[in-house]
């Protein structure tokens, strides 16, 4: 019913570089509540990087505060993650997450959580 597609990952050859991740939601969307970015490094659990409410209130993991900025464009059903001063320990697969009010085929509203497929971010030392 809803699809999240991430883009913008890649290789940063030197620590201190920047990347900007984007995520677009499409489908039977009535509204999107919170949106977030998570990441998962090899052998580790998935962890919250940052989230943003429908009203624009943000929250960041301590490890990225001051370096990463989450933002959203409600008109485009999109969320972004600007990552600056990247470190090798930021290397992970980054996942987009959204809490979406979906319109069903029976014209009902249902609240569901969706995930993107993930995008790899690699930071070399």
Image: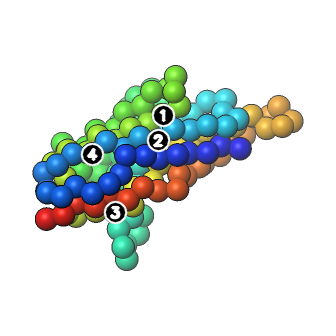
**Label 1 crowd (10 A; few <14 / some 14-19 / many >=20):** many
Is residue 40 shown above or below 112?
below
Name of the residue lying farthest toward the top: 75
**Would residue 101 be visible to someone looking at this image?**
no
Q: Earlier in the sequence, mark 2 or mark 3?
A: 2
Is disc 1 in contact with disc 2, using a CB cutoff of under 8 Å? yes
Is disc 2 in contact with disc 3, using a CB cutoff of under 8 Å? no
> Closer to the camera: disc 4 or disc 3?
4
**Label 3 crowd (10 A; few <14 / some 14-19 / many >=20):** many
User: Residue tagged by mark 1?
Assistant: 78
Q: Secondary structure at mark 1?
A: strand
Q: Earlier in the sequence, mark 4 or mark 1?
A: 4
User: Residue tagged by mark 3?
Assistant: 92
Is residue 92 shown above or below 70?
below
Q: Earlier in the sequence, mark 4 or mark 3?
A: 4
On the image, the x and y values in percent for residue 91 come to 28, 62
Name of the residue lying farthest toward the bottom: 43
User: Residue tagged by mark 2?
Assistant: 23
On the image, the x and y values in percent for residue 90 come to 25, 59
Gap in angstroms between the C-alphas marked 2 and 3: 16 Å
Gap in angstroms between the C-alphas marked 2 and 4: 13 Å
Is residue 105 shown above or below 85?
above
Q: How many marks?
A: 4
């Amino acid at each position: 019913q809803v699809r999240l597609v991430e883009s913008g990952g890649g290789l940063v050859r030197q620590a201190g570089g920047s990347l900007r991740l984007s995520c677009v939601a499409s489908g039977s969307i009535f509204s999107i509540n919170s949106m977030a970015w998570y990441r998962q490094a090899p052998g580790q659990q998935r962890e919250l990087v940052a989230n943003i409410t429908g009203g624009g209130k943000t929250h960041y993991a301590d490890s990225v505060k001051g370096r990463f900025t989450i933002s959203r464009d409600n008109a485009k059903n999109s969320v972004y993650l600007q990552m600056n001063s990247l470190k090798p320990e930021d290397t992970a697969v980054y996942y987009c997450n959204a809490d979406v009010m979906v319109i069903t085929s029976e014209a009902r509203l249902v609240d569901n959580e969706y995930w993107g497929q993930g995008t790899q971010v690699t930071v070399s030392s």
